[in-house]
């Protein structure tokens, strides 16, 4: 997702790099590329125009310091505008849920058929149970779509969450109706231990075919605490138009974007909040029932800027390791943040990421790690290839990969079914990730983005590239001789 926008912003920054100062002409030339990238990503036309206008106005209105590259100022301005686009003017973000105090909380899901509404209902129920300690009840209120009730029942059994059903509608009239089903489900929850009710309502293929009157009746009779619109991010501008139509009918509290792990161009994520004034609350990033994440504008803006999102990876790992103690989790957080981890830690992280799914998205969220997947390579194949190389190493080599020389690379390659140069390239990339993590640990976002953009433009992430020396750390891969000398000095100090 966002590959086109990332490329457009990167090209714009390159065109400005080296300019003595910001002028109207070079600003407009650079922003034309950004505007084209936004439109190609299916961002709303008016939203794209207003975004470019705001960036241009702020760039021209700032006093240009002679010691600062104009491109660095543009990076910060674009980042701030991206956050504003997805967040709006609110100083404080809306709560994810409006939990009721003295009765079950009611959440109503609505959306077009095929948007992933029923699956999202299951994901939401798991999130409420596992992260908010709630006892959710799923309600099958879609009585028109064939097998909708059976699908929700199967989903409920799979995740261990109760499902309330009353049977499908009878063709030609008769049988239960969605409004009464929702009302009865609320009464049922009040008499049981369920404290959250999730209504899975009916959908149609097109907005014009939607039973809006039925949805309004459910909204009026049941009075849900939250009304979430579930939409397919891959439909781009159509998702924005649908969100607006549903908001006009129901007064939405939030939007849940699904299928963001697919070939989504990102236009919906950048347009919905601005057009509808409704915040995006969650995003679906995979088929697994745990693949539902909170939508954080700042983090999404970092991804769009090509900077990566280290903290989302930390949180994913924490949720996958619920059995770990707080001390162990904090120790792991520090290791990941500071880049102070060895290949044993790295192998463990890979295994955890594989369990969580969406490997390509996860690796792309960590600066430098996306390069470990070769062009056209299936992420699952890449995982097995990298794990195989690490498993073929000795315990000493995994603990201290700097000791791996040519003869060791040949042995590891033979044991993992790869070539010696594959081992060398992997070690270089691993070292880059370790150095980058250490360098960005205490940086502000502005400093991190400057470093990452500079490295990317200089080709530092290309296979075999070497990291430059920096003020923050050595930043270069030492030779075997240098590393041996360093170890000797450390041993002498310990003896003293």
Image (spheres, rainbow, N blue to C red):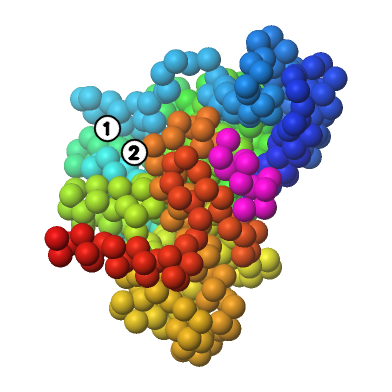
> Pointers 2 and 1 in contact (CB under 8 A)?
yes
Prevalent SS, magenta region? helix
Q: From this viewpoint, is residue 6 visible?
A: yes
The reply, left or right, for residue 13 in relation to residue 437 is right
Residue linked to disc 2: 197
Measure the C-alpha gap from mark 2 to mark 1: 7 Å
Q: Position of residue 425 (x, y in %)?
A: 57, 70
Q: Is residue 194 above or below residue 102?
A: below
Q: Which residues are magenta?
A: 450-460
454 in magenta: yes
Asked if the stretch drawn in magenta spans residue 490, the answer is no
What is the x, y in percent for residue 278? 54, 24
Observer-nearest of 20 and 89: 20
- The residue under the point 21% across, 60% down is 493
> Which residue is nearer to you in this view: 23 or 19?
19
Q: Could you tell whether 394 is left or right of 244 in the image?
A: left
Q: Quadrant of the C terminus?
A: bottom left
In the image: residue 26, left or right of residue 112: right
Residue 303, quarter of picture: top right
Side of 246 where 285 appears, left or right = left
Q: Residue at x 63, y 28 (%)?
A: 72
- For the image shown, how many numbered marks are present on the structure? 2
Q: Which residue is mark 1?
A: 104
In the image, residue 73 sits, relative to residue 431, either above or below, namely above
User: How busy is the neighbourhood of tag 2: few (under 14 within 10 Å), some, or many (20 plus)?
Assistant: many
Residue 296 point in image, percent of width and height = 47, 34
**Of the image marks 2 and 1, the number of the one nearer the N terminus:** 1
Using a 10 Å C-alpha cutoff, classify the residue at mark 1 as few (fewer than 14 neighbours), some (14 to 19) or many (20 or more). many
Helix, strand or loop under label 2: strand
Q: Which quarter of the figure has residue 8?
A: top right
């Amino acid at each position: 997702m966002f590959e086109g926008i990332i490329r457009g912003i990167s090209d714009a920054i390159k065109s400005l790099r080296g300019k003595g100062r910001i002028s109207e002409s070079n600003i407009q030339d650079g922003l034309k590329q950004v505007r084209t990238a936004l439109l190609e990503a299916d961002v709303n036309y008016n939203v794209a125009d207003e975004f470019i206008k705001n960036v241009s106005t702020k760039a021209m209105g700032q006093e240009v310091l002679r010691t600062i590259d104009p491109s660095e100022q543009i990076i910060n301005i674009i980042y701030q505008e991206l956050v504003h686009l997805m967040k709006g003017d609110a100083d404080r973000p809306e709560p994810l849920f409006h939990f009721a105090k003295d009765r079950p909380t009611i959440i109503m899901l609505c959306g077009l058929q095929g948007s992933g509404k029923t699956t999202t209902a299951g994901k939401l129920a798991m999130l409420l149970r596992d992260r908010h300690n709630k006892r959710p009840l799923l309600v099958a209120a879609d009585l028109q779509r064939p097998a909708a009730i059976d699908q929700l029942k199967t989903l409920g059994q799979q995740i261990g969450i109760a499902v309330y059903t009353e049977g499908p509608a009878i063709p030609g009239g008769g049988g239960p109706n969605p409004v009464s089903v929702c009302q009865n489900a609320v009464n049922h929850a009040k008499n049981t231990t369920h404290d959250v009710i999730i209504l899975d309502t009916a959908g149609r293929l097109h907005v014009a075919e939607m039973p809006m009157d039925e949805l309004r009746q459910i909204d009026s009779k049941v009075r849900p605490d939250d009304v979430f619109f579930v939409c397919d991010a891959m439909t781009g501008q159509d998702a924005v138009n649908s969100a607006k139509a549903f908001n006009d009918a129901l007064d939405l509290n939030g939007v849940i974007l699904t299928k963001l792990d697919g070939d989504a161009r990102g236009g919906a994520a950048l347009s919905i909040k601005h057009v509808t004034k409704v915040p995006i609350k969650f995003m679906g990033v995979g088929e697994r029932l745990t693949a539902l994440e909170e939508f954080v504008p700042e983090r999404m803006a970092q991804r769009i800027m090509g900077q990566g999102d280290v903290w989302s990876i930390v949180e994913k790992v924490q949720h996958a390791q619920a059995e770990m103690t707080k001390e162990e989790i904090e120790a792991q957080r520090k290791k990941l943040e500071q880049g102070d981890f060895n290949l044993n830690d790295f192998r463990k992280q890979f295994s955890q990421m594989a369990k969580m799914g969406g490997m390509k998205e996860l690796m792309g969220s960590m600066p430098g790690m996306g390069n470990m997947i070769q062009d056209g390579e299936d992420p699952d194949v890449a995982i097995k290839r990298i794990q195989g190389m690490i498993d073929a190493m000795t315990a000493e080599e995994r603990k201290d990969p700097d000791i791996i020389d040519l003869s060791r690379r040949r042995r590891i390659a033979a044991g993992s079914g790869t070539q010696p140069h594959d081992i060398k390239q992997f070690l270089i990339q691993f070292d880059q990730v370790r150095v980058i993590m250490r360098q960005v640990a205490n940086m502000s976002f502005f400093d991190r983005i400057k470093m990452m953009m500079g490295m990317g433009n200089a080709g530092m992430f290309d296979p075999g590239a070497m990291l430059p020396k920096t003020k923050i750390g050595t930043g270069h891969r030492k030779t075997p001789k240098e590393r041996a000398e360093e170890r000797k000095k450390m041993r002498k100090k310990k003896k003293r």
